[in-house]
Image: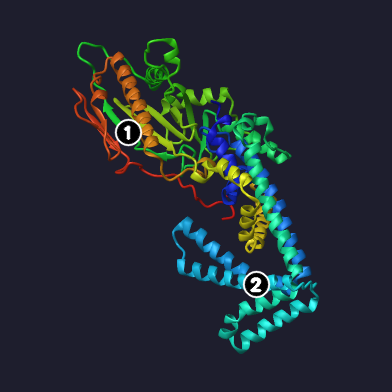
Amino acid sequence: MHPSLSEAGRLLCAGTYLDAAYRDRVIEELYVHEERFVAPSYGFDAVRVLAHALQARRAEAAWAAGVAAVWALGLVLAQALLLFLLLPAALLGGAGRIARRRDRTGRGSRLLELLLRASGWVLLLGAGLGVLQGTLEGTTHVAAARDGITLLDVLTRGLEQEPLGFLVRLPVLGHSAGLLYGWTALIVFGLLVLVLGFQRGHFAHVIKNSLNRARYADPAADPASGARFARARERIARTQHGGLVLYGVNDPFCGAGRPHRPWQLSVELRPREGAVPEPLDNARIVERVRPRLEALRAPSPHGSPEAREAVLDRLRELVLDECVFLPADGLPGAHALDLSDRALAEHREGAVEEGGERRRHFLRVRVGGWDENLVVTVFVRVHTQGGMLMLEVAPHVLLPVRQDFQEADDIAQRHLRNTFFAKAVWAVRRAPRSLGTAVSTLSGGGRGPWQIATAGHGGALPAGPAVSVRELAARADASLFQLMDVDRYVKTVQDRIVAGVTLALHEAGWHTEEFAERAVTVAEGGVYIRSVDHSAFSVGGSGHSNQSGTHRTDRGNGDGA
């Protein structure tokens, strides 16, 4: 399956409509920071994710403007009541921020959150009961300028004279404000609920229609507009699936996921008895490894061709290529760099034998499982130096997309098929904090254009990717089935790598054919050799846990999505 059509990519696109923070990070990394090269897109198309992120931001900004307009209308028609409602809105907004910070960082007082939330709802209840009573009594008052001034005067005098008692009586003040406006407040509130309900319905329709599996199969249907997006699309397309990987020194494998027990092995080359050893270069070793890895695509013999073709093992779709890692620092310009196949061939020819630090050649093996939700990529590097053979194997794993993104279709379906009453309740619950959300959306939407206009990213020196939009959306763990698949893919690929290297050494007359069969991967993350006949060796593991590290997916960015 082409990466642009994968299920993982579709879920990432849906996630830009569900999570504003994720959407902002996508836009910042792929759209605002023109100087950054894009992290490799394993199993998805970053261009499509960016297109939907921009569309989602435009739509949400439009709806946020509508919500702000309703609040402004309420301020005109029910000034005192709307000014009072800013208090519970601020309290509920603060409680929400504490909850989100606790979910994100683990820090945040539950007691303070509960106190703010309870206070906000008590004030809302007082105002709501007043509006209900005023409606039943037929009150229809339109605000005058003095209403707001009177309310502010009451608040100021109450806080000055008896602060604690006045705070206790705030719900009564809200009841009085609600009673004053009655039908006026009810109409404004109903209009606000209607706008919020339509906003939710709009995003549900987008996920249900524009991002369903059949529609997603046509990339031409993606929303796309603007000269800047066209430049971003070209820049991303040049690098995301190419063999030249432009990296930042602090995170060279950005985009590949978490390291999964990388290891390295150094073996002294000794002639085999009865054979004349031949010079052995890195390219020759790679050429012996490739066929063994490619053979993994072929199903084992079955009783019939039909049974053979019915095999669904993801190893049949194994992707094998050679890539060259180049440091982004020091390059003349992000747009001027030659990333053609010819340039890749030249870099490959130079890097495969040089064994350098900054430019590195890898054999790259990728297996995409679970509709590209689970991507295993193994980077292999071999080098001979001073009579030693050095083998480096760096498996990386992209874990499945976040659970809430996985449930995007269900969220949309549930909302669209829900009752009118349930939709109304959903909108009513979100109405009190809708002003803060709208203001945050509008200010966040303006941050990107402001950065583009003032930060000078277009003229900055080239840089490697700061984050991977796929890694940002990855879960922290996977199911047992998926973890079993990861181990199977990694062990299978590593066995073939070791077998290929062994074959190359044997054909060249070197005595190391036994060591690959005795190598075992242990829990600490190293490769240990039980027996290597007539060979001196050294082994290094990279860690003492199942995963030796993680990429930083919460790095600092330009403004601190």
Q: Is residue 80 above or below residue 287?
A: below
* In this view, 519 is above or below 451: above
Whichever of labels 1 and 2 marks the residue nearer the N terminus, that label is: 2
Q: Position of residue 392 (x, y in %)?
A: 36, 31
Q: Quadrant of residue 119?
A: bottom right
Residue 398 coordinates in the image, percent (x, y): 45, 38
Q: Does residue 558 appear in this view?
A: yes
Q: Which of 205 and 498 is in front in this view?
A: 205
**Label 2 sits on what residue type?**
Leu
- Between 274 and 293, which is closer to the camera in this rendering? 293
Say whether residue 476 is left or right of residue 152.
left
Looking at the image, the residue that sits furthest to the bottom is: 161
Q: Residue at x 69, y 78 (%)?
A: 176
Q: Which mark is residue 264?
A: 1
The residue lying at 45 percent from left, 35 percent from top is 374
Lateral position of residue 532 relative to residue 216, left or right = left
Q: What element carries label 2?
A: helix
Q: Categorize mark 1 by other alpha carbons within 10 Å: few (<14), some (14-19), many (20+).
A: some
Q: Is residue 452 left or right of residue 367?
A: right
11 w.r.t. 142: above or below? above
Q: Which mark is on residue 129?
A: 2
